[in-house]
Structures are given as structure tokens and as C-alpha cells.
Amino acid sequence: MSKAKIGIVTVSDRASAGVYEDLSGKAIIDVLNEYLTSEWEPVYKVIPDEQDVIEATLIDLADNQDCCLIVTTGGTGPAKRDVTPEATEAVCDRMMPGFGELMRAESLKFVPTAILSRQTAGLRADSLIVNLPGKPKSIRECLDAVFPAIPYCIDLMDGPFLECDEAVIKPFRPKAK
């Protein structure tokens, strides 16, 4: 079995300042390490809130780095600099709106401002791209909600088989007949 490559992208203008500790990207890696029992390799990037940079990074991770899954954090709010969803939509072949809908519904259980979030997901070639919010607590809540569908989505795209620790997260895969 080949090792799955998963892109982790933190989008933040603070990253350009040089003195920035990326808690959000590390939170994604920590959660995926808890979920996954199969071997995987993170391809980790911290980039500024610039649509062309986000697009180029997503394209590189999907087309050149062969990431089956790309998870972004940051840039999904209503601020003028928040352009991660626009960059994702620009590079995707097809959108997967159910991911954003479920993440917002889950987040509404915790904060009324979840309706301000613009998370989305889409497919580019053999990659699933999922936009998460920027706060580590919200990252966990959203991943807990949507991750059960991610391994099967990657299966349907002929990607690597992602095995999970079912005591932590139980992926949904239809039973064979």
C-alpha cells in the first residue's frame, strides 16, 4: 500500500511577518495523526492571504505533489482578505457543497457566528480540497463532522485507502454485497 500524501495549508497574513507559530496547521496534523492508522505524509505549507498564491499552492499540491487530500485552514471568514473559498473554487473541477454545509451546521452548535464562515470543498483531478476555519478548536469540531465521509470520497476517486482508528473516528464505507 502506498503512503497517502495529505496537503496541509495554513493561510494567514501573519505568516509573512516571520514570527508566527502556526497552531492551526499543527492542529490539523495532530487530528489526522489521531484519526489515521495507515501511513501518511503531510505536505505542509504556510502561505499569505493572496488568492493567486493560494491557487498556485493548491494546484501544486494536487497536480505535482499528488496529494489525495488537501486541507486548508484560514481565510474563510467575511474579511476582505479572506479569499480561500474563492481560490478553492477557481482551481476545482467540481464543488462538494455538502462539506461546507455540514461544517457550518456543526459549528452552529457552538457559536452563533458560524453563519459567517464560508468553508467549502471541491475536487481537482485526484484530490479532495477541504477548507476549514482557522481556530484549532473549530478545526477539530469540523473535521470530526466531515471526516467520516473523506476516506470513501478518496476511495471513489481511486486514491489511497485511508485506514482509521475506529475508536477515534469511524469512516463510512458502504458494505459490500
Image: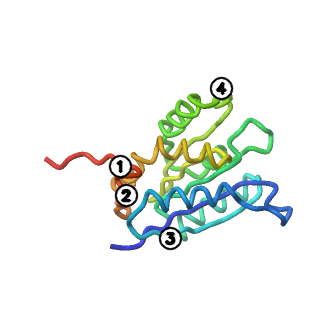
In the rendered image, residue 59, in percent from the top left (x then y), is placed at 59, 61
Q: Would you name the residue on which mark 3 appears? A: 41
- Please report contact status of discs 4 and 2: CB closer than 8 Å, yes or no: no
How far from the left and from the top, in percent, is residue 137?
62, 45
Q: Residues within 10 Å of mark 1 (few under 14, many from 20)?
A: some
Q: Residues within 10 Å of mark 4 (few under 14, many from 20)?
A: few
Q: Quadrant of residue 46?
A: bottom right
Quote the CA–CA distance across marks 1 and 3. 19 Å
Camera-side residue: 176 or 37? 37
Nearer the observer, 33 or 102: 33
C-alpha gap between disc 1 and disc 4? 28 Å
Q: CA distance from mark 3 to mark 2?
A: 15 Å
Disc nearer the start of the sequence (2/1): 2
- Residue extending farthest top: 112
The residue beneath circle 4 is: 112
Q: Residue at x 49, y 51 (%)?
A: 123
First reached walking from the N terminus: tag 1 or tag 3: 3
Report the amino acid beneath label 1: Pro
- Residue nearest the viewer, comparing 169 with 153: 169
On the image, numbered disc 2 is attached to which residue?
164
Q: Are marks 2 and 1 in contact (CB under 8 Å)?
A: yes
Q: Residue at x 56, y 63 (%)?
A: 7
Provide the residue designation for mark 1.
Answer: 171
The numbered mark, 4 or 2, whose residue comes first in the sequence reads 4
Label 4 to label 2: alpha-carbon separation: 31 Å
- Look at the numbered disc 1 and give the secondary structure of its residue: loop
Q: Name which residue type carries label 3.
A: Glu
Q: Secondary structure at mark 4?
A: helix
Q: Is residue 99 left or right of residue 26?
A: left
Whether pointer 1 and pointer 4 mark residues with C-beta atoms closer than 8 Å, the reply is no
